[in-house]
Amino acid sequence: MFHGNPFNYLTAPDNVSIRYGVWRTPADPAGSAVVLSGRFEFMEKYRGVIRRLNRRGIDVYSFDWRGQGLSTRPLPNRHKGHVGDYGEYIADLDLFMDRVVDPTAAGPRLLLTHSMGGHIALRWLRRRPRGADGLVLVSPMIDIRTAPFPKPLARRLARTARRLGFEDAYVPGAGDYVLADERFPGNRLTADPEGFLVSKREIVRNPGLALGGVTYGWLAATFDSIDQLTAPGHVSAIPIPALLVGAGKEQVVSVPAQRRICRELPDCRFVEIPGGRHELLMETDAVKARFWAVFDRFRVRRLGMPP
């Protein structure tokens, strides 16, 4: 996997470089999947997911969001997770679909998203309701959990800091990425030690992939976007079939918010995987097997892909 160099770059109108990759199947494709990752993530983390999709005869397209992976970082300290407005993410997805996916992708075309990637996909589909043929939301970030801070306090703090000019500062408790601080016991992401190590091994190979905590600006922009996404009727005009897969032991995002948005989508099925944590695609073999079984039923029955 990742033989040769599958990566290339796009330049956004604001001169930001967006790194992307394309992985094609050796035979005629049964369809295409656009993999949209979450915050902190990068394409190398999804080697196993890309391999599974290619084995199903599905071509894969993906890219690193601005501010992470090897796309342009907006601040001098590249460890700071920052964005000014989620409209920037949406515009980058628009650019990627227009320039890379739409001209070459075989149908049916599926968006396979994780966490923040699912949030952005829904915002984008609001503008382009038929921009894909199907949507799979894995642990989507419809709303976030802010413990130990109460959410109203976190909202006020982020917006006040942005208004006072501290949008580039880390939120309390956040800092640069330190590999030694990454410990499996007590982590909120996965119950699988190997899955937990996937991104860490990639960062050892290429330290430029590392990303630390978020800034007040990122957090304020996230709350702004959550308010837009969850406004009544925001997703009700997205007609494509959707599968939303939630984690039974979720500690990062809100499962009740996932259930609510699935009810608002015209054609959405919600499946919760017991025992799974936030990163379902990096989980134990049993959890991943459950996910891929649900995924395969969706792509075959709802999108018409061959088994």
Image: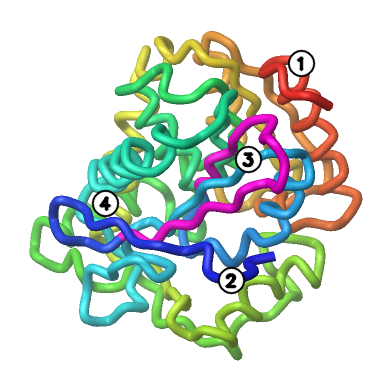
Mark-to-mark CA distance, 3 and 4? 23 Å
**Amino acid type at image mark 3:** Val
Q: Main secondary structure of the magenta part?
A: strand
Give the numbered dot on residue 138.
3
Tag 3, which secondary structure? strand
Give the residue at the far right of this rendering: 286
Mark 4 Cα shell of 10 Å, populated few (<14), some (14-19), many (≥20): many
Q: Earlier in the sequence, mark 2 or mark 3?
A: 2
Query: Are discs 2 and 4 less than 8 Å apart at CB?
Result: no
Q: Nearer the viewer, mark 2 or mark 1?
A: 2
Give the numbered dot on residue 145.
none
Circle 2 is placed at which residue position?
4
Q: Earlier in the sequence, mark 4 or mark 1?
A: 4
Residue 4 against residue 133 in the figure, above or below? below
Mark-to-mark CA distance, 4 and 1? 40 Å
Is 1 in front, or is 43? 1
Is 59 in front, or is 190? 59
- For residue 71, what is the image quadrant? bottom left
Question: Quadrant location of the N terminus?
Answer: bottom right
Mark 2 Cα shell of 10 Å, populated few (<14), some (14-19), many (≥20): few
The range drawn in magenta is 18-36
**Residue 108 location (% of width, % of height):** 59, 24
Is 175 in front, or is 70? 70
Give the numbered dot on residue 301.
1
**Residue 181 location (% of width, % of height):** 58, 85
Quick check: 235 left or right of 135?
A: left
